[in-house]
Amino acid sequence: MKKLVALSLALLLALGMTAAMAETYTAPGFYTITYPDELTLDNTSYADENSEDEIWLFLLSNDDYMLDAYITKLDEYANVSLYSATDAQREAYVADTLDDYADYQAQLVETVTTEEGVPFYVFSMQESDGAYYFAQTIANGMGVDFYAYYEDASLPLDDALLTNLHNVLASLRKATAQQSSGASDSTAEDTAAESGI
């Protein structure tokens, strides 16, 4: 009996430690994510480069890898949201993306669906300065984009990097009305209103 109690206590402590090892961040007006506390979040360094067509939201990084997050305007997908799209529309999106990024040797790696039913399509890409994963969903014609890559650009893509990206994507929750009203940058406010995620 003592062993069972000790084992239960150890399990509860382990679960508590796991929960404590995560941080939550809200990109005002867009979404909330959960990420490992070993990562450093930067949401200021590139904010002055934002435009009506592209909003940089944040960078998560440690000594090994980085996750970059953007919102981009996609004129060709005006009023499209992949979470409410038909299977045929989703298949057409994947085919178009593979075609658009053919020069980057794009390949569909996986689809990550959040608890709220938002599908992210994860593609592997290869450019002259290194390989990376590109994940995207579309909300009201706006691309919700994540890039995952290693600090050392010579490293190949692997399951460890994919898992780190997957876990952040799976944690994403849509912004609430209260969070949306907290957006401070006017360009971000306008884009958040359009994205509707």
Image (spheres, rainbow, N blue to C red):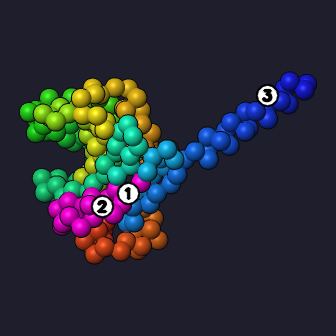
Q: Do the residues labelled 3 and 1 touch (CB within 8 Å)?
A: no
Residue marked by disc 1: 42
Mark pair 2, 1: CA separation: 7 Å
Could you say which disc has been placed on residue 115 in the image? none
- Residue 49 vs 139, above or below: the answer is below
Residue 21: image location, x then y, percent: 58, 45
**Is residue 50 shown in magenta?**
yes
Three-letter code, disc 1 = Asp
Pointer 3 or 1: first along the chain: 3
Mark sitting earlier along the chain (3/2): 3
Q: Residue at x 36, y 74 (%)?
A: 184
Query: Which residue lies at the image location 30% right of the left edge and 61% below the top edge?
Result: 45
> At label 3, which amino acid type do we have?
Leu
Q: Mark 3 points at which residue?
A: 7
Q: Position of residue 179 (x, y in %)?
A: 44, 68
Q: Is residue 123 visible in this depiction of the protein?
A: no
Q: Is mark 2 on a helix, strand or loop?
A: loop
Horizontal side, residue 82 vs residue 103: left or right:
right
Span of residues in magenta: 41-58
Q: How crowded is mark 1: few (under 14 residues within 10 Å), some or many (20 or more)?
A: some
Mark 2, residue position: 45
